[in-house]
Amino acid sequence: MRRCFFCLLKDAASGVDGMTFQEYEKNLEANLDDLVGRLKRKAYRARLVRRKYIPKGPGKFRPLGIPVLKDKLLQVAATQNPTSHIRSGFSAVQLFPISVFSFAASWSVVSSQWS
């Protein structure tokens, strides 16, 4: 997870919780331990996605969803080689449903806003 954290963009926009890369990094080990603990207990839930509208053309805007840092971190971790998850105490079978649930939860929030 530590390696995945440093794969994130340091100047990326923060999500609805306002947590920046630098703020998360200040207490990195405790934050990662908390995140991994919640994943192992299956207590982690994806947060809402911050909605930002960017100009598309004259008078038109395109929605952009900005997830919170923890969700970005888990998205990176889910795309890594499954053997790296096994080394960190997770099997690919354990991590995949969590990452899919997190993605599905954030997608359902986004899609419900468009209904």
Image: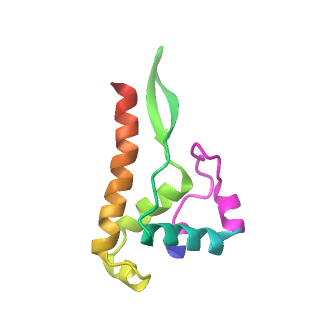
Is residue 36 visible to the viewer in this orientation of the structure? Answer: yes
Determine if the magenta segment contains residue 52: no
Q: Position of residue 96 (x, y in %)?
A: 30, 66
Q: Residue furthest left?
A: 93
Question: Residue at (35%, 40%) from the top-left corner?
Answer: 108
Identify the image's colour scheme: rainbow, by chain, secondary structure or one colour.
rainbow
Instruction: Identify the main secondary structure in magenta.
Output: loop
Is residue 6 visible to the viewer in this orientation of the structure? Answer: no
Question: Residue at (45%, 52%) from the top-left corner?
Answer: 46
**Does residue 71 sit above or below 5 in this rendering?**
above
Q: Residue furthest top?
A: 59
Quadrant placement of the C terminus: top left
The mark total stands at 0
Q: Residue furthest bottom?
A: 87
Give the magenta-colored segment's residue range: 5-26
Q: Position of residue 95 (x, y in %)?
A: 35, 69
Q: Position of residue 56 (x, y in %)?
A: 44, 25
**Viewer-proximal residue among 27 and 22:** 27
Q: Quadrant of residue 69?
A: bottom right
Question: Residue at (45%, 62%) from the top-left corner?
Answer: 43
Question: Residue at (36%, 26%) from the top-left corner?
Answer: 114
Q: Quadrant of residue 75?
A: bottom left
Determine if the magenta segment contains residue 15: yes
**Does residue 37 sit above or below 89 in this rendering?**
above
Q: Position of residue 47 (x, y in %)?
A: 49, 48
